[in-house]
Image (spheres, rainbow, N blue to C red):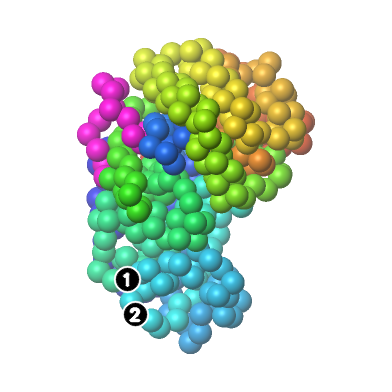
């Protein structure tokens, strides 16, 4: 699925970008290990238009207090004239579903269109640079999902994946992003209501990976992600579910689960083939693969447990002008 570049457009401009869900390999991907994720069909819409002063959702002068907007303007808006930025999102903030990546991707695409258009590979690097500058850490999985849509893998070279979409770099690190096939499954992502902070969790897990046990942990993350990728390529849902549970055990080991998330995983278990935390952890969301025919039951179980569940699938398109 090759998508066209973002075309040139005249202000006002509206763009939208999807959120994301990580299936395998979060945290380890920061250190070059494989990751498997999909862009989900929940979107953030960003509109920009000329303005006498900077505005964000009707409020004047918010740039200095909004690190993602500030980083995007510094990186991309060579014009320098103020913009009125309006954001509408279905992605809960700090939920592990890529709300910040979707916002930055939508904003960067709109700005790119206003400045003559931009191809997706360049946009992928720009958006990741902005997100990383705002957070201080991270990998380009979230931002690439927002730009490409569909199912993706990073740092993987096995028969199940296609040619590279692009490579993204930061400092001495480089990640290669490839598209993978859609097994045709419904996923249920459930927000715990407990916000998470990506930066501190990524740094804490990074310290764990830098310890004496780090190489073994990274190898285990890599093995599970690669096996998960192969199971998905074979459309083997039971094996994929088993590997989701195995990935969750690794996330518990590195300390990114939480009692609230564990309660949701327990609630999901009777109706799910497997489930795990998705994203940085410490809060945020879980993702579960429903047992065949039990999608509605799984959603109800998670809602009764106090979560905000979404039955979702892959976003057909990445960021686009509306």
Image location of residue 265, percent across then percent down = 68, 26
Which residue is drawn at the image coordinates 27% and 51% (left, top)? 121
Front disc: 2 or 1: 2
Q: Which residue is at the far front?
A: 212
Q: Does residue 306 belong to the magenta stretch? A: no
| Image quadrant containing the C terminus | bottom left
Residue segment shown in magenta: 152-166
Image location of residue 309, percent across then percent down = 65, 36
Seen from the viewer's position, the closer of residues 46 and 73 is 73
Which residue is drawn at the image coordinates 34% and 80% (left, top)? 79
Left or right: 4 as drawn, with respect to 186: left
Q: Is residue 251 above or below residue 69?
A: above
Q: Does residue 161 belong to the magenta stretch? A: yes
Q: Which mark is residue 114?
A: 1
Q: Which mark is residue 79?
A: 2
Seen from the viewer's position, the closer of residues 158 and 234 is 158
Is disc 2 in contact with disc 1, using a CB cutoff of under 8 Å?
yes
| Image quadrant containing the N terminus | top left
Image location of residue 217, percent across then percent down = 50, 26
The secondary structure making up most of the magenta span is strand
Seen from the viewer's position, the closer of residues 17 and 77 is 77
Image location of residue 224, percent across then percent down = 46, 21
Q: Is residue 281 above or below residue 101?
A: above
For the image, the number of numbered tags is 2
Q: Which mark is residue 11?
A: none
Q: Residues within 10 Å of mark 2 (few under 14, many from 20)?
A: few
Q: Is residue 261 above or below residue 226?
A: below
Which residue is drawn at the image coordinates 49% and 70% (left, top)? 70
Real-space Cα separation, disc 2 to disc 1, in angstroms: 10 Å
């Amino acid at each position: 699925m090759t998508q066209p570049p973002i075309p040139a457009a005249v202000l006002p401009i509206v763009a939208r970008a999807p959120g994301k869900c990580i299936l395998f390999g979060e945290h380890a991907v920061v250190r070059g290990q494989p990751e498997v994720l999909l862009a989900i069909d929940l979107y953030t819409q960003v509109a920009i238009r000329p303005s006498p002063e900077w505005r964000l959702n009707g409020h004047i002068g918010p740039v200095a207090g909004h690190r993602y907007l500030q980083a995007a303007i510094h990186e991309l808006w060579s014009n320098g004239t103020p913009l009125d930025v309006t954001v509408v999102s279905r992605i809960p903030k700090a939920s592990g579903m890529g709300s910040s990546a979707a916002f930055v991707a939508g904003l960067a695409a709109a700005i790119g269109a206003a400045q003559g258009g931009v191809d997706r590979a360049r946009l992928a690097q720009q958006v990741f640079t902005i997100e990383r500058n705002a957070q201080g850490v991270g990998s380009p999985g979230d931002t690439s999902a927002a730009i490409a849509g569909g199912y993706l893998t990073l740092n993987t070279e096995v028969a199940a994946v296609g040619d590279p979409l692009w490579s993204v770099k930061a400092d001495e690190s480089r990640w290669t992003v490839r598209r993978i096939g859609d097994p045709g499954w419904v996923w249920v992502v459930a927000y715990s209501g407990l916000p998470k902070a990506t930066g501190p969790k990524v740094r804490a897990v990074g310290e764990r990976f830098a310890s004496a046990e780090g190489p073994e942990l990274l190898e285990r993350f890599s093995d599970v992600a690669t096996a998960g990728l192969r199971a998905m390529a074979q459309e083997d849902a039971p094996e994929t579910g088993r590997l989701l549970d195995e990935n969750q055990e690794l996330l518990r080991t590195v300390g990114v689960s939480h009692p609230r998330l564990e309660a949701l995983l327990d609630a999901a278990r009777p109706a799910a083939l497997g489930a795990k935390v998705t994203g940085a952890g410490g809060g945020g969301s879980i993702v579960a693969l429903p047992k065949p025919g039990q999608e509605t039951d799984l959603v109800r179980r998670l809602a009764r447990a106090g979560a905000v569940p979404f039955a979702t699938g892959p976003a057909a398109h990445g960021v686009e002008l509306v």
